[in-house]
Amino acid sequence: MNLIDFASSPLSLLPPIVALSLAIITRRVLLSLGMGVVLGALLLSNYSITNSAEYIGKTISSVFCRVFDKVCGNG
């Protein structure tokens, strides 16, 4: 999967702005943060839904594997 670098682009501000705006408007913080994560993944994967879902899944699983080594078979 090829990820696009938005580090020097103004588009990199879009996910946090959306997340903050949704959190203020809807008062549902976790849903708003989730939408920010999904939007960020869509930007990274060049607006491909399948690549975004794959990226989010791999990232979440790697976080849990680092926290719970026994679950992933490393301990």
Image (spheres, rainbow, N blue to C red):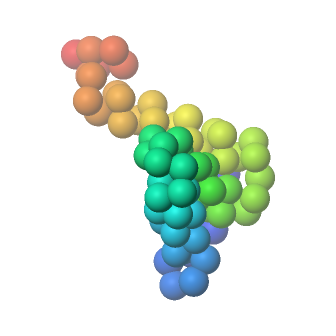
Measured along the vertical axis of the image, is residue 5 above or below residue 48? below
Which residue ends up furthest to the left in the rendered image? Answer: 75
Which is more toward the observer, 20 or 10?
Answer: 20
Q: How many numbered markers are drawn?
A: 0
What is the x, y in percent for residue 2? 66, 59
What is the x, y in percent for residue 65? 34, 28
x 76%, y 46%: residue: 49
Q: For residue 60, what is the image quadrant?
A: top left
Is residue 44 visible to the viewer in this orientation of the structure?
A: yes
Tell whether 52 sits left or right of 49: left
x 55%, y 35%: residue: 57
What is the x, y in percent for residue 22? 55, 56
Q: For residue 56, what is the image quadrant?
A: top right
What is the x, y in percent for residue 11? 61, 77
x 41%, y 35%: residue: 62
x 75%, y 59%: residue: 47
Q: For residue 70, what is the image quadrant?
A: top left
Is residue 37 visible to the viewer in this orientation of the structure?
A: no
Measured along the vertical axis of the image, is residue 46 above or below residue 55? below
Which is more toward the observer, 23 or 49?
Answer: 23
Measured along the vertical axis of the image, is residue 59 above or below residue 6? above
Tell whether 45 sits left or right of 13: right
The C terminus lies in quadrant: top left
